[in-house]
Image (cartoon, rainbow, N blue to C red):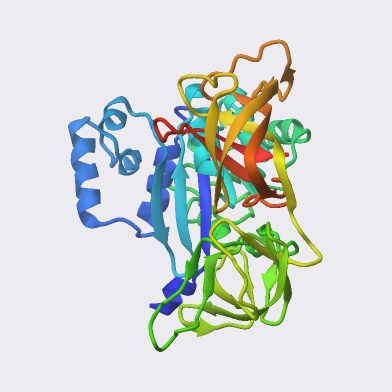
Amino acid sequence: MSSYLDMELLRFTTAGSVDDGKSTLIGRLLYDSKSIFEDQLAAVEKSSLKKGLDHTELALLTDGLRDEREQGITIDVAYRYFATPKRKFIIADTPGHIQYTRNMVTGASTANLALVLVDARNGVIEQTCRHAIIASLLQIPHLVVCVNKMDLVDYSEEAFDRVVQQFKDFAAKLDVKDVRFIPISALHGDNVVNRSENMDWFEGATLLNLLETIHIGSDENHIDCRFPVQTVIRPHNDDFHDFRGYAGRIAGGIFKPGDDVTVLPSGFESKIKSISLFNEDIQEAFAPMSVTMTLEDDIDVSRGDMIVRSNNKPEMTQDIDFMMCWLHPEGPSTRAKYAVRHTTKEARAMIKDIQYKMDINTLHRIEDDKEIGMNDIARVKIRTTSRLLTDSYRKNRHTGSLILIDEATNETVAAGMII
């Protein structure tokens, strides 16, 4: 069991426009990697027959909502879990429609990798650009462009090269570090799990092989030590009468027993006494591990505090400049107050100023129209009731992101990246 727990987890998001074959691709990945149950397959075979299809429609595997199965589109973010002997995976399957930018932002915010599907016949279209822009905005470290439906262009190398060139020309202005391209046919399974016999000109890895082997260990920030305290552990029993541990998930850096640390916002200094994981003491811990730490000194630490290295601290501020995606059908009202959640800390906040909206298709700023509606991405300034311990999103995706919540309804209304 522990070997399964120790396996590395890769989170990836899939994006493409409506009929690029995203659901078929995920269905093919699950089917060819033997990650589905027989009853699921039987249900899909039955639905396929009902639709009068002569093949098993693998896309139906992922379309969980009934509306989607009937309309053949993906509406909400659907999460799928599967594992191979090398890695565990979580797929966030997000819709391609223009009105679902918010779902893509939600699904992509924790991803290590984004799969962007392009139809080999149509090449790079407006939606491809939008998905790539969101991936770069959210600083997803790896981008894999799957050129799908290669069977419909006779598996032509020229058609593939043309799409690769189009995408490279467009992506030159984006901040994307690692882009890979794979020619596939999700319908027939070419280069998804098994190598394609129709495209012997392609020498790269299959999609599953790439997902299993791509290096994600250095995606986290291992330089700036950040440990937001989630809960304080006081067992209150005779065996551990004086035990006081701080549990949470490391958001950055590497911690070791003996390190000099500072607790923020109080500024108290101490040393790490021990770090434990599943009741075992360990000699070092790093993002994104969930651990319990104890300190040498008995100082006051509570949920929402952050343990950092004494010589490397985040910014403590109440005025936050952030790029937000508005998630709610009703736009923000001026001077309205929202609850803000940032790492393990909660505070209240007010939107002070809307600086500009961003045209998500071109990255241009729209400065004359500041009416914000659902799915809009805008740069705003907020003021919080207590100081937050922040880094820029570029530096750390955990300490650099926050969400706004409507206190009356408890709905999340915005999510964004600290600049």
In the rendered structure, the answer to whether residue 364 lies left or right of residue 98 reads right
Q: Residue at x 26, y 27 (%)?
A: 70
Image quarter in which the C terminus is found = top right
Whole-percent x and y of residue 133?
Answer: 66, 33
Residue situated furthest top in the rendering: 368
Which quadrant of the structure image shows residue 287? bottom right
Which of the pair 115/367 is nearer the observer?
367
Image quarter in which the N terminus is found = bottom left
Residue situated furthest bottom in the rendering: 239
Q: Residue at x 35, y 39 (%)?
A: 59
In the rendered structure, the answer to whether residue 260 lies left or right of residue 209 reads right
In the rendered structure, the answer to whether residue 370 lies left or right of residue 403 reads right
Which of the pair 372/124 is nearer the observer?
372
How many numbered marks does the figure carry?
0
Q: Residue at x 24, y 43 (%)?
A: 44
On screen, residue 112 above or below 23: below
Q: Residue at x 66, y 47 (%)?
A: 388
Whole-percent x and y of residue 62?
Answer: 35, 42
Looking at the image, can residue 395 be seen? yes
In the rendered structure, the answer to whether residue 399 lies left or right of residue 32 reads right
Whole-percent x and y of residue 130?
Answer: 61, 28
Whole-percent x and y of residue 127?
Answer: 57, 26
Looking at the image, can residue 147 be seen? no
